[in-house]
Amino acid sequence: MSDFMTLRPFNINDAPTILSWCKNKHAFRLWSADRYKEFPAQPEEMIEQYEGENMYPLTAVVGEGIVGHILLRFPSEDKSVIRFGFVIVDDSMRGTGYGRRLLQLAIDYACNQMGVKTITLGVFADNPSALKCYQSVGFKITGEDSYMIDGEKWKGYEMKYVNYIQKAIECVKDSVLLIHEQIYRKCNGDLDRIFTEEYNTESYTGKVLESGKVYELSYLKCTCPMVQQGFIKNPEHCECSRQSILYILSQLEPDSQFDVRIENTILRGCDRCTFRIMRLSESRIKLA
């Protein structure tokens, strides 16, 4: 897939490209706050930011191109919390969904591989596009603060990720999972057959986009009881559906790795909820 994103460890050769995305001092401070003394910063200064233990700076790549950057940091010794920082996407590619994909990859890794229970981050109020992106993947504002940046007081929001993973598991672990397990056994684990023969009902439809690798699953109506009863109307809740699909796949094929991407949802004003499912040949986060 041409838009297949991977996260790998940051290195100093990435720094010139990442720093070039901050076209002016204001954009630079929105990204880095007061962590750097001067604008523009130098590549060596980025390396200095990440010295010490419990720091995991990552670079997002699509193909051979660098498209984003994020830091995962343990702020405390018990390692129960991960804090995201220095989140940025190539300014020429904003609006492509890369920011949301970058965050989803980092969230999945932090929760499923690093085992953290809480993810936090901070964002300036004068950065509405970043705020909207964070909210779209499940972050909620939990507080406000102010910071002195270059002699001015800037308002900031503290945000915390609403972990939909456990909610998703509770929602599907009984009856829904059993149905998919029966289908999986009936088709002898052939996902191509499942998506063409079995995933075509009055409620949902399946499609094979790339045999053995890429699939599409569309729900003709939202199946979430909370949405059906009118209790939830926010599109960010669709992250729960994404996580439920990931969970079911992990139970069907525990030795395989999958990625699930939200294409569109009814809560976003579309006529159906569509998810793209990719079976991966390797992890999309390479920290080794």
Image (cartoon, rainbow, N blue to C red):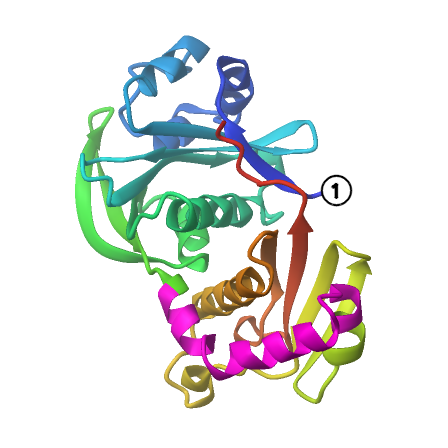
Q: Residues within 10 Å of mark 1 (few under 14, many from 20)?
A: few
In the depicted structure, whether residue 272 falls above or below residue 1? below
| x 41%, y 83%: residue | 226
Residue situated in front as seen by the camera: 262 or 277: 277
Magenta stretch? 166-194
Helix, strand or loop: magenta stretch: helix
Q: Let me know if residue 188 is in the magenta part.
A: yes
Find residue 43 and report its horizontal and vertical position in percent: 45, 12
Disc 1 marks which residue?
2
In the depicted structure, whether residue 104 falls above or below residue 241? above
Q: Let me know if residue 172 is in the magenta part.
A: yes
Residue situated in front as seen by the camera: 201 or 220: 201
- Image quadrant of residue 205? bottom right
In the depicted structure, whether residue 122 falls above or below residue 162? above
| x 74%, y 79%: residue | 198
76 displayed left or right of 256: left
| x 39%, y 15%: residue | 47
234 displayed left or right of 37: right
Q: Quadrant of the N terminus?
A: top right
Find residue 138 and report its horizontal and vertical position in percent: 39, 59
Amino acid type at mark 1? Ser
| x 49%, y 50%: residue | 104
Find residue 171 and report its horizontal and vertical position in percent: 43, 77
SS for callout 1: loop
Find residue 145 and report its horizontal and vertical position in percent: 17, 45
Q: How many marks?
A: 1
